[in-house]
Image: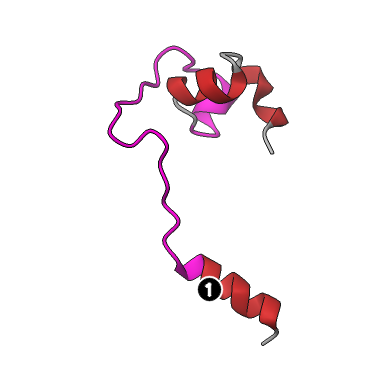
Amino acid sequence: MSNIEEDIDRYEDDDYSYDAYEGESRTYDEFAGSYAQDVMGYSDEEIYDAFDGEPDAYWNID
């Protein structure tokens, strides 16, 4: 196994469950029906923060 494969395996095994909204309640009402929320799973708060309240801007996230 190459070093890259070992790094990938190690990354997949680690718990990287950082949650920027930990402790806050999330809502999924305001942007219900949008691709960003229904398919991608972003909450209303995430859409406001990351997309400036425009759920159609989901394609621009790196």
What crowding class fits label 1: few (fewer than 14 Cα within 10 Å), some (14-19), or many (20 or more)?
Answer: few
Q: Quadrant of residue 5?
A: bottom right
Magenta span contains residue 47 = no
Quadrant of the image containing the C terminus? top right
Q: Quadrant of residue 52?
A: top right
Q: Residue 51, percent across and down?
A: 60, 21
Q: Residue at x 51, y 26 (%)?
A: 37
State whether the magenta stretch is mostly helix, strand or loop: loop
Q: Residue 46, percent across and down?
A: 49, 26
Left or right: 57, with 38 as reference point: right
Q: Residue at x 65, y 27 (%)?
A: 58
Query: Which residue is the site of mark 1?
Result: 10
Tag 1: residue type?
Answer: Arg
Asked if residue 58 is positioned above or below residue 22 in the image, the reply reads above
- Observer-nearest of 29 and 53: 53
Name the element at disc 1.
helix
Read off the magenta span: 12-41
Q: Residue 44, percent across and down?
A: 45, 20
Q: Residue at x 70, y 30 (%)?
A: 59
Q: Quadrant of residue 54?
A: top right
Left or right: 52, with 3 as reference point: left
Quadrant of the image containing the N terminus? bottom right
